[in-house]
Amino acid sequence: MPATPYRLRPADTGDIQEIAVMSRCLIEVGLRGWTWHPARVARALRARETCVLVADVRGRIAGFAITEFGDTRAHLSLFAVKPVYQRRGIGMAMIEWLVESTLTAGIDHFTVEMRANNFAARSFYEALGFRQQQYIAGYYQNVEPAIRMRRDLQQQAAARESNKTV
């Protein structure tokens, strides 16, 4: 597949509707209701502790990530790449950008959940250094189980610090 030129940027208010629709169609499909509706995406965009990142391809959103930053952990709340842009490095670049932000903030680990039967997502995150941490029955609307994965960043942060002093 040819490389797709993209740029990563913070989301803005003009992206809210498309992010919400992508969530409904790519993540929340098969679940009751719509939990990441435009108002919730807008709240995330305004929240100081949250980063809403988009991958932009020629002015169109190819993917997005919503990450909450705490004192010791970052949590990827929502992440999607449109199917036409998958397997082109965009998703990987978005996660690595978020990991770098996490390291800069001095946070020691990064977590994410996905449906337990989403083997493609599990493989994707494993390739990025995440490890399965927990199986959570009924996580999605008390119906579908989830897998929580975690990427520990202490070693990466220590290596980064030792490179600064060299």
Image (cartoon, rainbow, N blue to C red):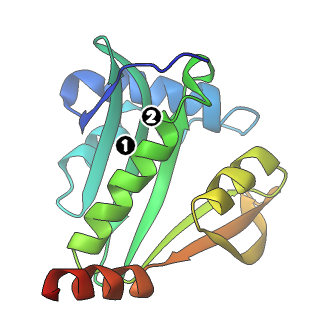
Q: Vertical placement of 44 versus 21: above or below?
A: below
Q: Which residue is mark 2?
A: 37
Instruction: From the viewer's perspective, tell me whether residue 17 is left or right of residue 63.
Output: left
Instruction: From the viewer's perspective, tell me whether residue 81 is left or right of residue 131.
Output: left
Closer to the camera, 65 or 143? 65
**Residue 67 screen position, x and y as percent:** 37, 56
Q: Vertical placement of 103 versus 40: above or below?
A: below
| Residue at screen point 41% across, 54% down | 96
**Residue 4 screen position, x and y as percent:** 45, 19
Q: Vertical placement of 132 versus 81: above or below?
A: below
Residue found farthest to the front: 166
Q: Is residue 118 visible?
A: no
Task: Give the residue type that dot 2 points to.
Answer: His
The image quadrant that residue 155 belongs to is bottom left
Tell me the quarter of the image containing the N terminus. top right
Q: Which residue is mark 1?
A: 40
| Residue at screen point 70% across, 38% down | 32
For the residues labelled 1 and 2, the Cα–Cα distance comes to 5 Å
Task: Give the residue type that dot 1 points to.
Answer: Arg
Mark 2, other Cα within 10 Å: few <14 / some 14–19 / many ≥20: some
Mark 1, other Cα within 10 Å: few <14 / some 14–19 / many ≥20: few
**Is the residue under label 2 in contact with that under label 1 (CB below 8 Å)?**
yes
**Residue 117 screen position, x and y as percent:** 85, 51
**Residue 28 screen position, x and y as percent:** 64, 37
Q: How many marks?
A: 2
Closer to the camera, 2 or 166? 166
| Residue at screen point 58% across, 30% down | 24
Callout 2: SS: loop
| Residue at screen point 57% across, 35% down | 34
Instruction: From the viewer's perspective, tell me whether residue 119 is left or right of residue 158.
Output: right
Tell me the quarter of the image containing the C terminus. bottom left
